Image (spheres, rainbow, N blue to C red):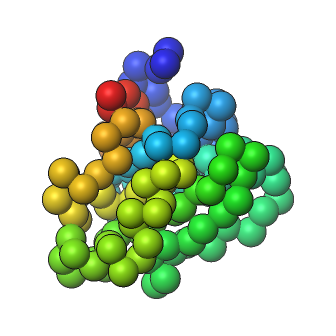
């Protein structure tokens, strides 16, 4: 996989373009782990990635903050978008269909809320960070997980 180095984006549109550009690299069994602070750009990235993978640019993509998981059908197979922010223990993920989701593409916000041994073994680890003195900018660091 050829990945970009750290990227600085200056708008939600730029963040969405980065997500759309990474979508063709993903395949079943991959996990995309989104890390960073609240308001860091994870949800913007997730929506754009889901829209790119489904091929539906106007798709309504609700946040799974309350449901914890939102499933989608894509031409590459099933996609599961998890938001683990409200998780109280790692064991709760199995009630959400985690094992089945490992066979498709997984998009996981707040992956640090569960034991690292439960995470998909391959895919992308993406870290979002604010850029000092630039409130609309984000630094996005993409690392391949093998």
Residue at image point 62% right, 47% down: 49
Quadrant where the C terminus is found in the figure: top left
Identify which residue, 139 or 69, lies in the foreground: 69
Residue at image point 75% right, 46% down: 75
Residue 29 in the image, given as x and y percentages of width and height: 47, 43
Q: Residue furthest top?
A: 2
- The answer to whether one can see residue 133 in this image is no
Residue at image point 66% right, 63% down: 72
Residue 116 in the image, given as x and y percentages of width and height: 19, 52
Above or below for 44 versus 19: below
Residue 71 falls left or right of residue 121: right
Residue at image point 56% right, 35% down: 26
Residue 86 in the image, given as x and y percentages of width and height: 31, 79
Identify which residue, 93 or 8, lies in the foreground: 93
Residue 83 falls left or right of residue 56: left
- The answer to whether one can see residue 71 in this image is yes
Residue 22 in the image, given as x and y percentages of width and height: 58, 32
């Amino acid at each position: 996989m050829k990945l970009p180095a750290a990227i600085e984006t200056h708008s939600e549109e730029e963040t969405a373009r980065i997500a759309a550009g990474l979508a063709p690299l993903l395949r079943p069994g991959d996990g995309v782990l989104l890390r960073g602070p609240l308001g860091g750009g994870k949800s913007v990235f997730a929506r754009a990635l889901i829209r790119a993978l489904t091929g539906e640019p106007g798709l309504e993509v609700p946040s799974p903050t309350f449901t914890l998981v939102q499933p989608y059908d894509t031409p590459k197979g099933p996609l599961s978008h998890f938001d683990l922010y409200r998780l109280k223990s790692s064991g709760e993920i199995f009630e959400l269909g985690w094992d089945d989701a490992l066979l498709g593409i997984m998009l996981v916000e707040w992956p640090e809320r569960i034991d690292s041994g439960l995470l998909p073994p391959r895919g992308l680890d993406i870290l979002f960070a604010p850029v000092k003195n630039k409130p609309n900018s984000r630094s996005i660091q993409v690392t391949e997980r093998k």
